[in-house]
Amino acid sequence: MKHPQISKTRREPQFARQLKPVAWASSIALLTGAAAVQAQQTAAAQSASTQSLETVVITGIRKSLDSAVTLKRESRGLVDGIVAEDIGKFPDTNLAESMQRIAGVSIDRAASGEGSKVTVRGVGPDFNLVLLNGRQMPSGIIGFEGAGANGSRAFDFANLSSDSISALEVFKTARAESPTGGIGATINIKTARPLDLRERVASIGVKANYDASVGRLPDPLQGSKITPEVSGIYSDTFADRTIGIAISGSYSKRDSGFNKAYTQNGWGTNDPAVKSVSPTSNIVNNPAGLYATSRELRYSLTGMERERLNGQATLQFAPSKDLKFTVDYTMAVNTTHSKNAEMSSWFNNSFSGDLKGSPATQFTTGPVAAPIVQTAIWDGTHDLALNTGQYAQKAKLSSTGFNTEWKVSDALRINVDAHHSVSKTTPDSPYGTYSTMDLAMFNQGNATAYYDQKFPILSLPGQKFDDTKLNVTGTQFRNNLSDQTVDQFQTGATYRLGSDDKLLAGLGFTKTKNRSASYNNQNNDWSGVAPSLGQFAGISTGTYGLAGLFNRIPGHDDSRLFPSFYMADFQSLRDRAVKVKMANTPGMTQAQAEAYFAAAPDYSRGDDWRATEKSSSLYGQWDHAFDSSIPMNISVGLRYESTKVESSSQVVDHSGTTTWGSQNEINLASGGTTFGTKSGKYSYWLPSIDWDADLAENLKVRASYGENIGRPGWNQMQGGLSLGGTANPNGGGNGSTGDPALKPLRSKNFDLSAEYYYAKSSYAAVGAFYKKVSNFVTTSTIDTTVAGINNPASGTYYNAALAACGGNTQPLCIRNYIFRNYNGQPGVTATGPLNAAEVAGVITSAVPGATPIPFKVTTFTNGPGDTIKGLELNFQHMFGTSGFGVSGNYTKVKTGLKFNNQGTNQQAALLGVSDSANLVGFFENDTWSIRGAYNWRGEFLAATSDGNGNNPVYTEPYGQVDASIGYKIGKSLTLQLDLLNLNDGYIRQHGRTDEMLVSAIQTGRRYLIGARYRF
């Protein structure tokens, strides 16, 4: 079989073949002249535009699979796809969920359990390029749960409804005509065009969404268990099919929840408090070699409310069969509001003291030792944290595009495309994107954490709820902004030299402006907003059973678990905090107190990263079909890519006096802002070649080689040094910086595959891939200090206290000693009784002999790289005309870029590499449409830092069972039932060992029932 882009007409007459040198000369001029034009993003979509994918009447599961098989079989290079079963009916409710059916594609799930990003062949979301109708789309991802500005290039598929999507195309091999940026794959999302449809289409759909995760939340956090979805599409042609209009829209509301047990501040390695423990019997088996301890253990509950509005309008005008104009507009608005409650206990490596019946700390054996029992010793006045917060953000995407397709002659086609697209995510609350109020109850004694089960167990013997012991000890009101604009012009030409040859040439220009900003109005009232306890008594609180909140995670019913979860109402707590702050701050007005507990109006005092990236490209590609006994096709191309980057970053100046106001945190000064500007540039020549051959009528083999680049993330290119607002007395502070002169990842890709099409709509395929990646961008943590930022937990007084405390670095003993012996001296001010079990007060960097605070600064460098290699197996089988069918795939991926769990140094490990498998079975006839699917992803490295240095975070294997049932009534009405996460799975992450829990997240099942009527 020859590629359909080349005519299947047999050889032309002799005189025509003699003219080929002239055609070659013309084509060379075409490659170098003004006519040598084709936009890079349009090319990826255009490569399949002439396929039968566009002409199949799509109705039902089988037609959907038939079209996908046709796309795979007839494309040059490796292309997989998913096609809508009908207009307005994509196979899944989420685009990312659909893509995991493709071999080599696995998904990253958001906290709600919904698929949001994709990893392809072991390459993470930042290096998979997403296009909408062949155009590069901006992304507007911001940090979640207190994270700041986000520099990811990943596209969040949760922002787009699947209702208006006609097809997804996944291009796995690099070609000259394809855009750069997708080392793993280039993913093209296609929407229906009215002049491509053969009939008028008008339909409307309604659904009711039942989310069982809502019922696992306490009443104050619950939303509605049942929420609506509405969608519709209208497409028609007029004036003898010269004018086409299509309008589609969808609205959905989803309330959900997730419960999480986690360690926020990571696992500290080789903390000296373990070795200086007193008495030594407090640790059963003091470890040798590398060991780690947990900073704290937290239980967090979050109720989420999401509203999503999508719309698209397309106008087409074809004054002749050779000329077509298209204008389109796409919009998406995704609003998310969340309520959060959290209960946590800080351990702070407090191993020394009286166990009072609590178990001694016990570690696993090496090579990396982790605690299976960790006891923190407190005197009964330690603070149990009962934090409460709200999150609110609104993401908006808008894209306006223009396209012209012109068939100049039978030999020459020209395409011109331009678009302006904006993605912006902003706060959607006066309290900011993320707000939390740290409420502490000062009556906690010893705490023991057990890490011997999947669920982490916190034991708090004798703990009682006492609202007279409550105080607000710190608040955060953070605003995050992500604003990205893409302006793109693309134009190109295809010149057919003859029945077996054609040339493609193109150029494109893309300008991307990215802004990521963040400011945290953090109030460091660590000694308490109220100077004495009791002023927060009577606020709205609740007590709930802890075990029942995590009933799907093994170990939740352990008898050692503290039985209660305490939570406070955010609004009630904030209202009281405003009154208490005013009462204890002379001269403070109501307006000032309200602003104190609210987000700042702008980012003038925060981090503000701005980058402009300008890229230009030029390519030429020759496609040839061999008229031989074994039909073969070959495509040879070369692409030139040039990019310039300029990054200007505003960061907060933290130089000045630092204050140590509580055991766990040192507050940095917050002064003005400074700017840093850097620039960089790079250019590459990227060759490619694709070959395929039909060894038999039903057997095709392929081989490909191509080079591609993946650009660094926006956060990796920031200028200036950004420091966190707080530091730990023992661990120091954190910061980050970037470099716009970073080189992009460069990948040399080899692919081999064989496809056996043994029956209609049935095939089996095997493929092998090998990627040699260089210039890998690594995340490293550098230990450094910053001039003008000194440590109040150092100097003459600290050294004397450390000696008096027997070398124990636990802050309680050291602070009490300093207050009791140096109160009133430079840098030391006690605000509470000196005989208190924990003396309240502030120690500043004005103490004698203060040394600089150590900072762990995250930075980015280009590493040497390594290889990614893998094997893909996939099949599809239809059982004759019975209506039954089955499909599946398995992907095995390996890389040399692994994390060494026994090392604490900087490591160039590749994120997201995992095996994956999918199995789908279905039945369909004229009335029923039934599908069941199982999707599985193996363990993978999710991060190379857990917030406490160069420590890995692994996501454990996850599998999910989904099903759908459709019932057709007549020709127009279809009833639909979608059943998601039927196995009610949970997501767990760990560190260097399984015992080092990072997080365990539980969501719930989800059911959607609805109907679609086609007019």
Image (cartoon, helix red, strand yellow):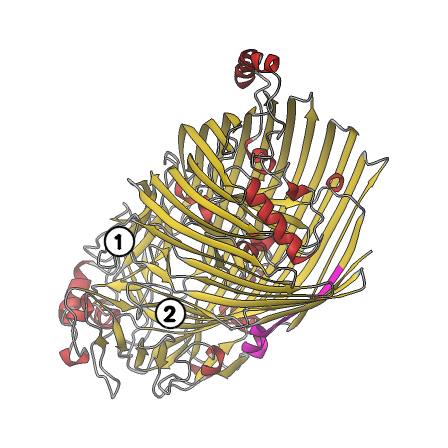
Residue 364: % across, % down: 22, 73
Up the image or down, 448 lies above or below 41; here it is: below
> Dot 2, crowdedness within 10 Å: few (<14), some or many (≥20)?
many
The image quadrant of residue 877 is bottom right
Is residue 885 among what the camera can see?
yes
Residue occupying the point 59% across, 67% down:
963
* Residue matched to label 1: 853
The amino acid type found where label 1 is placed reads Ile
Q: Is residue 194 magenta?
A: no
Up the image or down, 717 lies above or below 915; here it is: above
The image quadrant of residue 834 is bottom left
* Residue matched to label 2: 527
Residue 230: % across, % down: 73, 60
> Which residue occupies the foreground of this view, 857 or 1010?
1010
Residue 534: % across, % down: 45, 80
Determine the residue located farthest toward the right in the rendered image.
239
* Element type at mark 2: loop
Is residue 394 among what the camera can see?
no
Residue 637: % across, % down: 47, 27
Q: Is residue 208 magenta?
A: yes
The image quadrant of residue 367 is bottom left
Residue occupying the point 52% across, 50% down:
141
CB-based contact (under 8 Å), mark 1 and mark 2: no
Highlighted range, magenta: 205-220
Viewport quadrant of the C terminus: bottom right
Indicate which disc, 1 or 2, sits on the residue closer to the N terminus: 2
Determine the residue located farthest toward the front in the rendered image.
629
Q: Is residue 244 left or right of residue 580?
A: right
> Which residue occupies the foreground of this view, 20 or 594?
20
Q: Is residue 909 left or right of residue 287?
A: right
The amino acid type found where label 2 is placed reads Ser
